[in-house]
Image (cartoon, coloured by chain):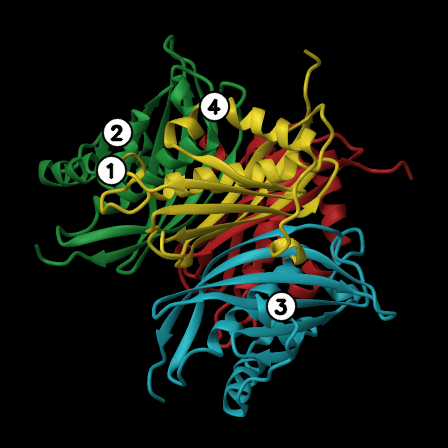
Chain colours: A red, B cyan, C yellow, D green
Amino acid sequence: MEDFTQQEQAHPAVHKRVQDSFDRQGLMAHLGARIAHIAPGRVHIVLPSRPEVTQQHGYIHAGATSAVADTAGGYAALTLFSEDSDVLTVEYKINLIAPAVGDHIEAIGTVLKAGSTLTVCQLEVYGVQAEGGRKLVANGQQTLIRVTRPAP
Amino acid sequence: MEDFTQQEQAHPAVHKRVQDSFDRQGLMAHLGARIAHIAPGRVHIVLPSRPEVTQQHGYIHAGATSAVADTAGGYAALTLFSEDSDVLTVEYKINLIAPAVGDHIEAIGTVLKAGSTLTVCQLEVYGVQAEGGRKLVANGQQTLIRVTRPAP
Amino acid sequence: MEDFTQQEQAHPAVHKRVQDSFDRQGLMAHLGARIAHIAPGRVHIVLPSRPEVTQQHGYIHAGATSAVADTAGGYAALTLFSEDSDVLTVEYKINLIAPAVGDHIEAIGTVLKAGSTLTVCQLEVYGVQAEGGRKLVANGQQTLIRVTRPAP
Amino acid sequence: MEDFTQQEQAHPAVHKRVQDSFDRQGLMAHLGARIAHIAPGRVHIVLPSRPEVTQQHGYIHAGATSAVADTAGGYAALTLFSEDSDVLTVEYKINLIAPAVGDHIEAIGTVLKAGSTLTVCQLEVYGVQAEGGRKLVANGQQTLIRVTRPAP
């Protein structure tokens, strides 16, 4: 878990590959999410708080929280594979630990174990206040499968 | 599990309470989801396929699939509690079993065990074709907690 | 889920393959578990209640409940694959819904979706009284991976 | 997660309470498990490898791995609560990341978030070789509920 504090950057080619794939996700644009950081085996995604992503009490919806957490984990895995690889979510489990309040949430996907077929990621989501408060609002675990992309 | 085929309807007051709460969820409106059926202990939510809910291959995003599954389970639980109760998701786990293709997906939340504090729901999501094809695309399990709403 | 009530039996060769593998599991013998039924895509395992499998209140331990549930799911998957296949648990999630009391527990693993690589099973565990009472005590969901056994 | 490297000890009264409860778990004695460390919010349990805890290939059975992981998480939570509290597992999810080989496995339960009703723990299990090798073999996440013990 040491890499949580290092601000290592992924190789520019990996960065581009992740960003290009993210930009093809209609849901991420529709929610207003953006990639905040891409490191080898770790991706951060930020989702600003706004009425379009809330549940009935005005907090960020567990579904939106999960969507960015799942996406962060998927791209964290993708950073570790070759160009002809793609990654699909097999399953994930997420605990909603505290109401998702804040100016935005930040989801961090971190690879715990990368395998040639299956990869396991840890998912964390923090509620972040503009003035700097930061609190864990969700924590999860995800299994992904690597697939080979058909040649174009 | 016998009630899967019965088309029982919840009491009109319960129906109204669930629909009113759903209508306050900014995310559900933003995704384009709607409640399709409300029975005691079971709620169906439909999400039409459109570019705003896709992942990078054009299928419905696991995050959108999960969001409607989680919501269906939460409201399934809510149908069983008194008017001053609210329900929050503690955690859920979902397997993405097949690509979420179809004209729409239909998420079904069904209460397996309702308790005074904790409730467990089964979550199923089907991909549905306009011409009638129907396929399980995701399956999950959810834990919810009942809380008492503050008096208005 | 239609096959829950049918008492179909697996082919004798499949039955033997499952039983032989089960008999090589030191843990199952040590706990006192036995296979009660083998159908295509569904296996039942029974664990009698005795002091060696309890937690601090004298109920059957969540770990013992999970162990037989996980094993039932694994063998349910194995019934569907060819002789040179083996099955490993990738992950599972289980809710302990009620105290596991009874003369024995019965774990039922049922295949929800079998794939060439990954298989998803539903796990149910019932507490069973000698006089016939039967109650759901745990419910779970499991992901398995098929591997090819090395030739002997 | 900073406390992973500190070797803080729980208060002797807490230590005794956890050990006494552990000693009443028939399953832990039957498996041969023992508590290796008790810190506030973190408990380590060791399970030696022996034929009684294996699956069909001779590795430690996922059920045994899960049983000690679940127990470690439960006692990690218990260290944080008052004497009249008890803790029950609501649910957990565990990924079996690598074959559980080694002279023993060590399960570590760590509280991520303690609440008055629900507590969330992280579960890790390492395979440990006598000569010092150490490898993550399972990783999980657990939800627990605090209950008040009846007065004796």
Which residue is labeled 4 in the image?
D100
Q: CA distance from mark 2 to mark 1?
A: 7 Å
Question: Residue D25: which numbered mark, if any?
Answer: 1
Can see residue A9? no
The residue at the point 57 percent across, 52 percent down is A69
Instruction: Specify the subunit that label 3 lies on.
Output: B
Measure how far apart labels 1 and 4 are at the Cα level. 23 Å
Question: What x and y, as percent, mark residue C117?
Answer: 71, 35
Residue type highlighted by circle 3: Ile
> Does residue C125 sit above or below A14 in this rendering?
below
> Could you tell me how far apart the alpha carbons at marks 1 and 3 are, in whole angstroms?
39 Å
Q: Residue D31: give x, y in percent of width and height.
A: 32, 27
Neighbours of disc 2 within 10 Å: few (<14), some (14-19), many (20+): some
What residue is shown at x 60% (from left), y 82% (from top)? Answer: B8
Q: Which mark is residue D29?
A: 2
Q: Mark 3–mark 4 contact, CB under 8 Å?
A: no
C52 sits to left or right of A49:
left
C-alpha distance separating marks 2 and 3? 43 Å
